[in-house]
Amino acid sequence: LIVMGIESSCDETGVGIVAWDPAAPDGPVRLLADEVASSVAEHARYGGVVPEVASRAHLEAMVPTMRRALAAAGIEKPDAIAVTIGPGLAGALLVGVAAAKAYALAWDVPLYAVNHLGGHVAVDTLEHGPMPPCIALLVSGGHTHLLRVSDLGEPIEELGTTVDDAAGEAFDKVARLLGLGYPGGPAIDRLADGGDLAAIAFPRGMTGPRDARYDFSFSGLKTAVARYVEGCERRGEPVPMADVAASFQEAVADVLTMKAIRACRDFDVSTLVLGGGATANSRIRSLAQERCDAEGITLRVPKPRLCTDNGVMIATLGAHVIAGGAPPSPLTVATDPGMSVQISAY
Ligand code: ATP
Ligand code: MG
Ligand code: FE
């Protein structure tokens, strides 16, 4: 079974193709094509994703990206199409869903409408094989979710999410404050490399005894960084950029990994999966590894290319959904910009 995945929920136009073979010795999913076109450069001057710009970029990129994927896989058409219907930007989602419906109709293949967040978790099976019940931590520019996954074909339980900024968004906002440009995550990561992560005691949001166990908050941290920088400027002192970056990054990594491990312990789960573009962060990775090792938890992290938005993750989730026996979605299926992670497919 060959499944094509179409992704357009944010600023990446992704078309991925995978082959599903449950009898294959090295895992059921095999990669055939992974084509991504990103409009990230067009958003840089605004310091964040501009929905209308993203939608137009998807319109221009969709068909060429699709053609490249088909050529790379060496096929004329897939056996099924999976498409992200949410959560994401309304106009951006419409482009991918319209394309998926048109191709499904033209090729006479079934359409499966799936959840973007489930895709971030499912993509790990491509590299690391079948997934036992796990806790998943998704961190990107638009999302921060702590999830409990029992089976990829089944609804996912959301344990917690951010009450304000997403983790990647916090990186982007702090980078902007430090004059580092957009996207800010990679720049802060590089700068932090030469800094002292214990130099400044930035706050750990929502870690008090009365706070929700699995929710996150990063806006207080962002404000604390702003106050610190203002303080330096007021006193006429140079801002210790590398120390600020390292201490900020440590505060984010500390809270994310602490709550992820807490969830593993609470639910007696011994596998933690990371996903989303911000898991490219070197400190989030190393601290997660350190804490998982200490707890006897297996950490699974897809390679960076598969952590950011792409079509392969949607194709992979689609394959799991099909294998789970879900019926195809009607061609009238609508986008769902605020889609809950509890729904893996329509
Ligand atoms: P979505 O939220 O729908 O998944 P997105 O485009 O916002 O989409 P991704 O493309 O998955 O998210 O990831 C981009 C985000 O990841 C940006 O916020 C970026 O700053 C952050 N990021 C990328 N590399 C790093 C890094 N090394 N450290 C921290 N953050 C990073
Ligand atoms: Mg992106
Ligand atoms: Fe994403």
Image: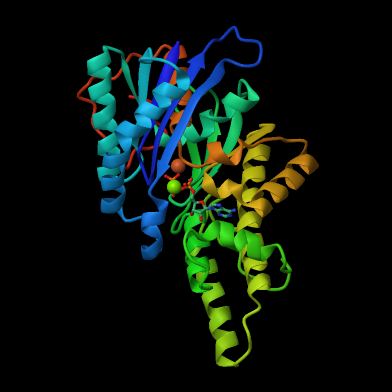
In the figure, 224 relative to 8: above or below? below
Looking at the rendered image, the quarter that the C terminus falls into is top left
Identify which residue is drawn at 61% across, 10% down: 24
Residue 108 x/y as whole percent: 26, 12
**Residue 336 visible in the picture:** no
Identify which residue is drawn at 39% across, 32% down: 115
Looking at the rendered image, the quarter that the N terminus falls into is top left
Classify residue 167 as left or right of residue 266. Answer: left
Furthest toward the right, the residue is 294
Total marks in image: 0
Q: Quadrant of residue 101?
A: top left
Residue 35 x/y as whole percent: 44, 33
Identify which residue is drawn at 60% across, 58% down: 252
Who is closer to the viewer here, 229 or 20?
A: 20
Query: Which color scheme is applied?
Result: rainbow
Classify residue 339 as left or right of residue 213. Answer: left
